[in-house]
Amino acid sequence: MLFHLGNSKRRTLIGSTLVAAVALLAAMIALPWDLEISQWVRLKHIPGDLRRFVQLMEIFAHTLGCVMILSTLLWIDQRNRGKLWEASLFVLTCGILANLAKYVIPRRRPSTYDSENWSWLNPDRDPDIPFASSWDAWGTPLSESWFNESIRSFPSGHTATAVAMAIGLTYVYPRGKNLFLFMASVAALQRLVAGAHYLSDILVSIPLTLMVALAWAWLPQRESRGAIR
């Protein structure tokens, strides 16, 4: 089975629904404070080596990084090549869906506020100017250009891809489950530290990927191939 949280489909459905519900609830709680959370996280001092490690983990969520990882595995692991192709297609699907959502729901990235004269990250800010609200980051649906990266914050495509990588690689290499989840978590954190996404962007990407994974696991033709274990 490409995706599982238990020993049966029923447990998978229950477990994944709980994870998705918790992530969505956390996103709703974070939503009004997204801008403040982003600024606070980036003002925190992270030791040099740890910060570099967090930044390097973007490779687990970036398109080119995932292509390199999966291509290498496809080349060296002929025994699991079929599963790896399936995992690769799954990761691609999740990434495409997340990026389509970015176009439908424009949201200004937190880093674009850094030069504003109210921003905590701007050393020359005017203390008399009120801080902007997290709600000010949202734009009108379908009103912005697909190529305008500054407004493509919601949801986090990197996080959706990283979670998909963790699920897909766990399908191929079950023993690496905890490692893959750790890598996906750090990759998601990197998006917050880099100012590329708000906390709610990251949290919403988790149920997005889980829904795709569940739909993938419930495809009827997979049963006939004997792919579900």
Image (cartoon, grey):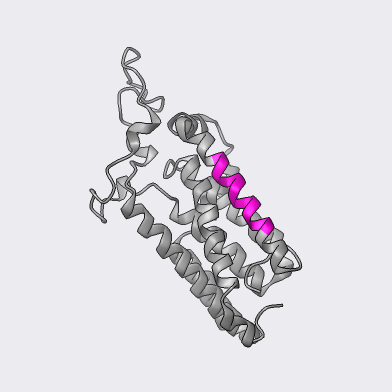
Residue 4: percent from left, percent from top: 68, 66
Residue 35: percent from left, percent from top: 43, 32
**Highlighted magenta segment, given as a residue range:** 14-26
Q: What residue is drawn where x is 29% and y is 41%?
A: 139
Residue 206: percent from left, percent from top: 54, 53
> Can residue 151 be spotted in the picture?
yes
Asked if residue 91 is positioned above or below residue 220 in the image, the reply reads above
As rendered, which of 205 and 52 lies closer to the eye?
205
Find the residue positioned furthest to the top: 128
Instruction: Classify the position of the C terminus by image quarter.
Output: bottom right
Q: What residue is drawn where x is 55% and y is 78%?
A: 86
> Can residue 5 be spotted in the picture?
no
User: Residue 68: within the magenta?
Assistant: no
Asked if residue 193 is positioned above or below residue 220 in the image, the reply reads above
Asked if residue 145 is positioned above or below residue 32 in the image, the reply reads below
Left or right: residue 101 compared with residue 218: left
Q: What residue is drawn where x is 50% and y is 68%?
A: 91
Q: Quadrant of residue 39?
A: top left
Residue 10: percent from left, percent from top: 71, 64
